[in-house]
């Protein structure tokens, strides 16, 4: 599920990016990220950011690109539900929302749960920014030790300046109390 309205999932070059109002690039080649995938992402920055070319060059010119690497929480079955959910949400927020224009993980919702859990392990290993659907899969994986917790997806739409955005979060229920885990561009749309 895309965060932008119309989804165009194809191999695009910078000139084609200018023609599409909404687009969504997906890393289908896996890891490590190939040079052609990096180039598509830099093209996206150049086209969409107001000072795109300067921003891309300033980042690419840096020799030491240290980034924080958050540690995934280890949830014990005996841990309290509220503290476990808080630690999962904190981890999602440390990964940050993916504004790059490139979805790093090629999520197929129809895949078996075991395959999605393998993808969650890859997300933890690579520690890259994620979007809402990836956050749901990661939340499913991280909360799996909490056997008394019921999990379900919540999908909804929002609009801003005439554009439609689709969202998904992981709904949780235990002992008559409901909540959600997730990641979104807006803080009010992800964690309750």
Image (cartoon, rainbow, N blue to C red):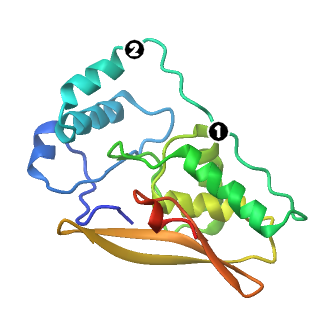
Task: Find residue 23 and report its horizontal and vertical position in percent.
Answer: 23, 54
In the displayed orientation, state which residue is furthest to the top: 63
Left or right of 2, for residue 94? right
Q: Quarter of the image holding residue 145? A: bottom right
Q: Name the residue that disc number 2 marks.
A: 62
Q: Residue at x 77, y 61 (%)?
A: 83
Which is nearer the eye, 123 or 95?
A: 95
Q: Residue at x 75, y 76 (%)?
A: 149
Task: Find residue 136 and report its horizontal and vertical position in percent.
Answer: 56, 64
Q: Residue at x 19, y 26 (%)?
A: 53
Q: Quarter of the image holding residue 50? A: top left
Q: Is residue 115 visible?
A: no
Q: Is residue 109 visible?
A: yes
Question: Disc number at residue 70?
Answer: 1
Q: Residue at x 56, y 50 (%)?
A: 93
**Discs 2, 1 touching: Cβ within 8 Å:** no
- Answer few, some or many: residues within 10 Å of disc 1's Cα (few below 14, many 20 plus, some between 14 and 19): some
Task: Find residue 132 and report its horizontal and vertical position in percent.
Answer: 47, 61
Q: CA distance from mark 2 to mark 1?
A: 22 Å
Which is nearer the eye, 151 or 121?
A: 151
Q: Secondary structure at mark 1?
A: loop
């Amino acid at each position: 599920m895309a965060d932008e309205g119309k989804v165009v999932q194809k191999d695009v070059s910078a000139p084609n990016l200018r023609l599409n109002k909404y687009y969504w690039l997906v890393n289908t080649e896996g890891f490590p990220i190939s040079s052609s995938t990096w180039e598509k992402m830099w093209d996206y920055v150049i086209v969409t950011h107001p000072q795109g070319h300067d921003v891309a060059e300033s980042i690419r010119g840096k020799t030491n690109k240290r980034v924080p690497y958050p540690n995934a929480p280890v949830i014990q079955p005996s841990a309290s539900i509220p503290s476990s959910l808080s630690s999962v949400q904190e981890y999602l927020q440390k990964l940050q929302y993916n504004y790059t224009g490139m979805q790093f993980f090629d999520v197929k919702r129809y895949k078996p749960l075991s395959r999605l859990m393998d993808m969650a392990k890859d997300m933890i290993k690579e520690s890259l920014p994620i979007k809402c659907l990836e956050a749901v899969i990661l939340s499913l994986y991280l909360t799996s030790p909490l056997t008394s917790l019921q999990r379900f997806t919540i999908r909804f739409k929002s609009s801003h300046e005439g554009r439609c955005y689709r969202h998904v979060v992981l709904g949780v229920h235990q002992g008559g109390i409901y909540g959600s885990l997730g990641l979104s561009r807006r803080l009010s749309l992800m964690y309750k």
